[in-house]
Amino acid sequence: MIEERLAGGGVNEVVRVGGTVRRPVGDWTPAVHRLLGHLADRGFAGAPRVHGFDERGREVLDFVPGEVAHYPLPAYAWSDASLAAVAALLRGYHDACAGFVSPQDAVWYFPAREPVEVVCHGDAAPYNCVFRDGLPVAFIDFDTAHPGPRLWDVAYAAYRFVPLTAVGNGEAMLPVDEQARRLRLLCDAYGVDQAGRAALPEMVGERLRAMVDHMYERAEAGVEAFARHVADGHAELYLTDRDHVAHHADLFRPM
């Protein structure tokens, strides 16, 4: 078999073999496979199908054709149409989670977060989104999936796709008024209710704080990828963005 290493994969090495992707597994893999099986049964086309494991113990998933948006983001990932489509894709994913029953002994990468409404993707970002013809068609890399509220996923998607950043995160920084406009577009396309819109800035802040805490925890545990992220200043970047969202919280309540 000819293996082609794929771009991205910040923590894991991911390779393509023909029409499949091979990825390392973790304690959470059985729960993720059960989730992906549920999505397939529901007819949700925005996630890869599972094909078990290969002879090296790696999980085998569909290779989803298209382009994955890595930083700096390509122009098509900045369009209003792309932003609205990714919000609709996330809503479709969450709706497809309806009826999924997480086994009592299920292990997830992150602990469940209350109130549990869906299984959050956990890392809905351009680098985990496949685009075709300039529009998002599927999410990939469900390793960080875990039960939680819809808004937990929406908050991180807003942070990444609007994006709600004070420093750019590798792409051009939008004026605050434009960030607010795009955030409203995302909320409208997803269908975020009034209570969710009111709570969104604080949820973004909680999500970024949790990401930083996890980064330090894994770095201290000796995980090289996370130690590299800390050394490269990612934690300070996310905390700066957290302060940015808090400072403009009233503007970022798209009521």
Image (tube, helix red, strand yellow):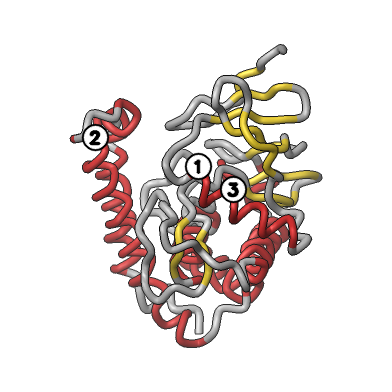
Residue 42 figure quarter:
bottom right
Relative placement, left or right, of 136 versus 110 is right
Residue at figure coordinates x 59%, y 56% from the top left:
35
Q: Residues within 10 Å of mark 2 (few under 14, many from 20)?
A: some
Residue 206, x across and y down, in percent: 31, 64
Q: How many marks?
A: 3
Q: Nearer the viewer, mark 1 or mark 3?
A: 3
Residue type of the residue flagged with mark 1 = Glu
Q: Secondary structure at mark 2?
A: helix
Q: Residues within 10 Å of mark 1 (few under 14, many from 20)?
A: few
Residue 110, x across and y down, in percent: 37, 53
Marker disc for residue 219 = 2
Residue at figure coordinates x 41%, y 57% from the top left:
105
Q: Residue furthest top?
A: 2
Residue 201 figure quarter:
bottom left
Q: Secondary structure at mark 3?
A: helix
**Gap between marks 2 and 3, in whole Å?**
27 Å
Q: Residues within 10 Å of mark 3 (few under 14, many from 20)?
A: some
Q: Nearer the viewer, residue 84 or 19?
A: 19
Residue type of the residue flagged with mark 2 = Ala
Marker disc for residue 33 = 3
Q: Nearer the viewer, mark 2 or mark 3?
A: 3
Disc 2 vs disc 1: Cβ atoms closer than 8 Å?
no
Marker disc for residue 195 = none
Q: Nearer the viewer, mark 2 or mark 1?
A: 2
Q: Point out the tag, 1 or 3, that comes first from the N-terminus.
A: 3
Relative placement, left or right, of 199 versus 59 is left
Residue picked out by circle 1: 171
Disc 2 vs disc 3: Cβ atoms closer than 8 Å?
no
Q: Secondary structure at mark 1?
A: loop
**Gap between marks 1 and 3, in whole Å?**
33 Å
Residue type of the residue flagged with mark 3 = His
